[in-house]
Amino acid sequence: MRRSERYCLYALGAMYAGPIVAMVVWAWAAQAPRSIVALLLTAVLVAAVLAAATRTWRPFLLVQLPLSLLALGYAAYTVKFGLPPGHTLAGILVRTSWEEVRGFITLGPGKWLLVSLLSWAACYLALTLHAPKRPIFGDRANRWCRALILALVPVSAYTMLNPVQLIDGISFNPTVGSVMFLAGDIPRARAESRGSRVHKIPYQARRTGGEEVHILVVGESVRRASWSAYGYARTTTPFLNTFGDQVVFLQDAVADANLTEWAFPILLTGIAPQDLATSNVRGNLLDLAKEAGYRTAWLVNQDVEISTAVGIDADRLVSPLDFEANINGRHTLDEALLPAFREELARAGTARFVGVHMMGSHWEYYRRYPPKFQRFGSAQGLGALSMVSVLLDDKNTASAVVDSYDNTILYTDWFLQQLIEQARLLSVPATLTFFPDHGEDLQLLDGETGHGQPKYTQHAFEIPAFVWYNEAFRKAHPGIVAALTRNSSKEIRSHDVFYTMAELMGIEWPGRAASKSFASDRFVPDTVDPLVAGGILISAISERKPAM
Ligand SMILES: [Zn+2]
């Protein structure tokens, strides 16, 4: 072998080994020694199998190129995020549209990532073309191979003593791990994102009529009493305060549940609280809209699994990447949804339903808005544990928590303004309905904190809600606007939203119930069905209207 060819093979060997070494260094700190040995053993075996299959150096190295690229990505992700690619990354990838991928690659860090990968691949390819053509296994190599296989026997026996550590080690091999990720995690996440866990039964919905646009915005942890549009002393909703007559504010909207995991499916399916079970979910508002001929888009700045759990399968699902999400939710601001929202509204020529699921006012409040919305108080000194000090009767923190909560409302008001002003540009009939999943208790004002307690607390259930419509909608459907106005002071519950949205969208189907649509003359307020407090059914009658 010529000297240049030998150097070529050394360089390629180093490129091949790089991701493996990175994985070993990463695994060194926290993984069992047996897993690390299994990782190395797998690397040797994968190389040996490929060498046996390709026989000569150049094809062997060419086959390695895509595998090495995958391995490089796998190791880089593991080192950066401290965990190999798995369910979370798969979920993010399958829900990311090509438009977002294109945006990531053409802007910012994605561009440099792509340039580095391409340079790496070009380098590898150039070296491969200088590699020897001769067989990998000459006489000497064969002898080495036999010796190696003999040496591997006790090592294999050692790793097999603990099957869990063995499997971990194999999956930490960057080549095998990335193939397992592509062949296992990705298809599973795709199945989940299509809502395949829900057994769907068609609604047999239909609709006549032309192009209309209907928007549902699901808010998060929105306390009605904190909106100046409902009389709060601080001006937290400056835009909504000056709305004029193209909007109907619901005066007595009540969340069916004080937890997202319960309230959200009820909103999207119309199932009453006492009947909510996965086996009773036959589909959701988006399925109904699709059957009736709507194009559907679902823009999520929440944990997207809340949506996929009720089988949301939109024509376009947007869930911005967020690697910083923690137990208190995502750190991406709701405005990340605005570009996709604008695109969906601009998609003229077909009836459209656009859903928006906000991060809204979920705790850590001070993380939900950009610095320019820090109008009330100061968020300095607030941290993830401030909720605990609030419970310990720390008045200063309790007051700062209320301030930061009010800033989330200010930001929500601005966010809703962006949506409505975009919708105002439409000439076809259009509506926007805002309905949060549930409210929120603030220790300083309510003597309670947060939401999701297993008991009724007024502000975790009483929410603000409204329906905005444009002039074209009012002209086309004066009866609906009149009914909305007439029903606006009645008690309206989360499970009415499904039927009302369907009514706004002009959808007919055998299960339609006008009595549950507050956009209908025949609406009957539901004050009887129970509420869900922290997962427990409680009586709406005795809790909301205590005996005098
Ligand atoms: Zn929630």
Image: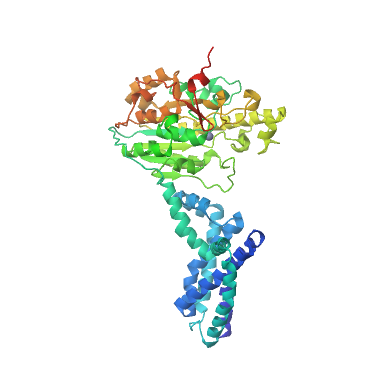
Left or right, 235 with reference to 49: right
Residue placed furthest toward the front: 161
Q: Is residue 11 visible?
A: no
Report the colour scheme: rainbow
- Depth check, front residue: 24 or 322: 24
Residue 56 horizontal/vertical position (percent): 47, 80
In x, y percent, where is residue 151?
A: 59, 78
For residue 295, side relative to residue 94 (left or right): left
Q: Residue drawn 53% across and 71% down?
A: 124
Against 132, is 293 above or below? above
Return the residue found at the far bottom. Answer: 139
Would residue 494 be seen by someone viewing this image from the given angle? yes
What percent of the width, then of the height, locates residue 270?
Answer: 40, 31
Count of labels shown?
Answer: 0
* Quadrant of the rendered image containing residue 432: top left
Q: In which quarter of the image is the C terminus?
A: top right
**In the displayed structure, would residue 381 be above or below residue 316?**
above
Q: Check the picture and name the quadrant holding the N terminus.
A: bottom right
For this orientation, the residue located farthest to the left is 208
- The single residue placed furthest to the top in the displayed view is 548
| Location of residue 7 (image quadrant) | bottom right
| Residue 83 percent across, percent down from the top left | 59, 55
In the image: residue 9, left or right of residue 182? right
Residue sitting nearer the eye, 143 or 437: 143
Seen from the viewer's position, the closer of residues 535 and 17 is: 535
